[in-house]
Each structure stands twice: as structure tokens, then as C-alpha cells.
Amino acid sequence: MVWPIRSRIISSVLRSKAPLVGSCVHGDSVISSITKPHPKFMNWVKSDGCHASSLPSFKEKQPEDLSNESKDLNVGNYMVETDGYMNLFGLMKQRFLNFKNQKYIKELEHFQSLAEAQYPKFMVIACADSRVCPSNILGFQPGEVFMIRNIANLVPVMKNGPSECNAALQFAVTTLQVENILVIGHSSCAGIEALMSMKEDTEPRNFIHNWVANGKVAKLKTKATTSHLSFDQQCRFCEKESINQSLLNLLSYPWLEDRVKKELLCIHGGYYNFSNCSFEKWTLDFKGCNVNEERSSYVVKEKEFWS
């Protein structure tokens, strides 16, 4: 069986000469920081025989032992090129085998218990940005965190209806009974830039705009507070303001607010700046918050700066 891979997406890539990997959405455009795709690959995609049967073969390195495998992983530890093509799955295989031998087997009893049930203490809501990996940045281990990632790490209010985010939220709070929720934002967030770029008098034009519209309150507060600043500075301000607005939005769910009132659950914010590798952490002060829909306000405490 052969699978055609022509599509509107590939056509748009060919027209724009854009990279095939590593791009992020900014408004209606696509931005990328990776070099152009290999010309041989582009010729292959353009050819009439654009089927899975004509896929280029990857020469996968078979490590003689685990030590050689680990050496390969330590050299950059990023997706590498083999014969001009991205040998993505070859490196994934090496990483998986390294995980299995260096971690899974050594902690077999722990992973066997995880196979039976999970008891995470934390839920993390983070951005889907490829540069922001909470498990990597904060060292979370398997079984420690129930995680969801979306564009701009937003939490919609309950009245906006069901979404993947609040479905995961309900499971984490009511079934897993996590004790902490941490919403993590980050610097140079394209989702926040898309939110700040949206015109007030127009309807959302695509899935991205429909989603980031959940941060509208944070945008309005940002505009009111930072009207004298540049657009980039406003976006940096909104990146943090939207985190705090999401913390307030969490309280719109009665079953979550009830656990916060009973001090069974704490809500935290976090901000990762990957330009200087620093992290800010704070906790929402529930007693000082006003979740009135007309005029909400928040107070934070226990601020920390890690650098």
C-alpha cells in the first residue's frame, strides 16, 4: 500500500520555500528558525512519484553497545542529519533505548508501580511551544506531573464550555486529586503575540484566534496598563498577565474552587525566560482574590526568582 503525501500543506510549503520542521505560528504567518530543507528532498516532493514507496531510506546506525549509544546522544543530543536527511526516528530509537537501559530497568520497581496507577501531586498547564518542555526544564519525573500543553498556556473560564484543557483539569482535580496546579508561561510566546495583534472589532478568523481569544481579559488589562510601551514590551507584559488571568479562570470551576477553599489545592504561576534561562514562580493568594466577572482582581504571594 502506498500513501500519497501531497496536500495543501506541502503545496504551501513549496510555494513559500519554508522549512519543513521547527516552525511556529505567528498570527496568520509561519515563522521558522531552521534552515531551508535539503534540495534533494524538495525535488523528491515535487516529483510525480510522491508516494511512501519512494521515501528515501535512512541508514540507521546500529550501536555496538550502550556506551557508544550514550556517546552519540551526548554529542549535541539534537536531531541530526544523516546523508542529507533528518534521521528523526533513528535518534528517537537511540533515546528510547537509552531511557530503557539507563532509567527504566534501573528503576524497574518504580515503573511497574506506575503501570498500575498514577498519583501525581502536580498538574502543569504549559505552552505547546517546542522550546518550553516542563519535564526538561524543571526535572519532572514519570508519575510526578499530570500535564496539558496548549497554545499560550491558557485556561478558559467554565462558561466557555468544554475543551481539552478543562477536561484534563477536571480529571486531574476530581479523580487524581492533585495538590498543586502550576500554569507556566514563557518569553517570546507567539500565541500571546497573536492575541495582542488581534483587532478588537473583528471576529476570530481561524482556530488559533478562536483559542487565544480566551486571553482577551489579559489583553485588555495589558493595553490599559502599557499603552505607552512598544508592542514587544506589551507582549512581554501580557505573557505574565495572561498567566495570572488563567489562575483566576481556574477558580471559575466550582469543584476546583472548593478544594482551594478547603486548602487541599494550591494554584501557582510560573514564567520561563529562555533568553537568559531564568524562572519566576509565584502562588495565587486565594483570600485576596476577587473573581467577580465584572471586575476581577488577584493577589500573589511567595514570589521566587531562579537564575
Image (tube, rainbow, N blue to C red):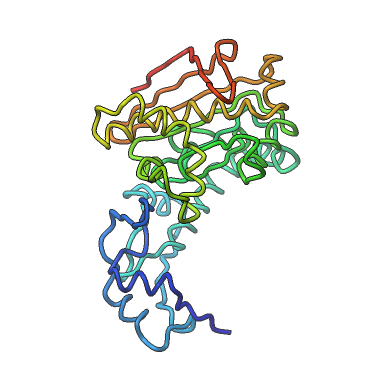
Q: Quadrant of the N terminus?
A: bottom right
Q: How many numbered badges does the structure rendering display?
A: 0
Q: Which of the 4 quarters of the picture holds residue 141?
A: top right
Left-right relation of 266 to 68: right
Q: Position of residue 135 (x, y in %)?
A: 50, 37
Q: Look at the picture and state if 36 lies above or below 255.
A: below
Residue under the image location 48 percent in, 25 percent down: 244
Above or below residue 154? Residue 30 is below
Instruction: Tell me which corner region of the image, top left, top right, bottom left or bottom right, holds residue 230.
Output: top left
Q: Quadrant of the C terminus?
A: top left
Question: Which is nearer the eye, 216 or 236?
Answer: 216
Give the percent coordinates (x, y) of residue 16.
29, 68
Query: Residue at left 58%, top 25%?
Result: 293
In x, y percent, where is residue 196? Answer: 37, 40
Q: Is residue 16 above or below residue 228?
A: below
Residue most toward the bottom? 48
Identity of the residue drawn at 53% across and 80% down: 3
Farthest front residue? 201
- Nearest to the observer: residue 292 or residue 150: 292
**Residue in front for this viewpoint, 258 or 127:** 258
Q: Is residue 122 above or below residue 85?
A: above
The residue sitting at 59% across, 44% down in the picture is: 104
Image position, residue 270 (x, y; %): 45, 27
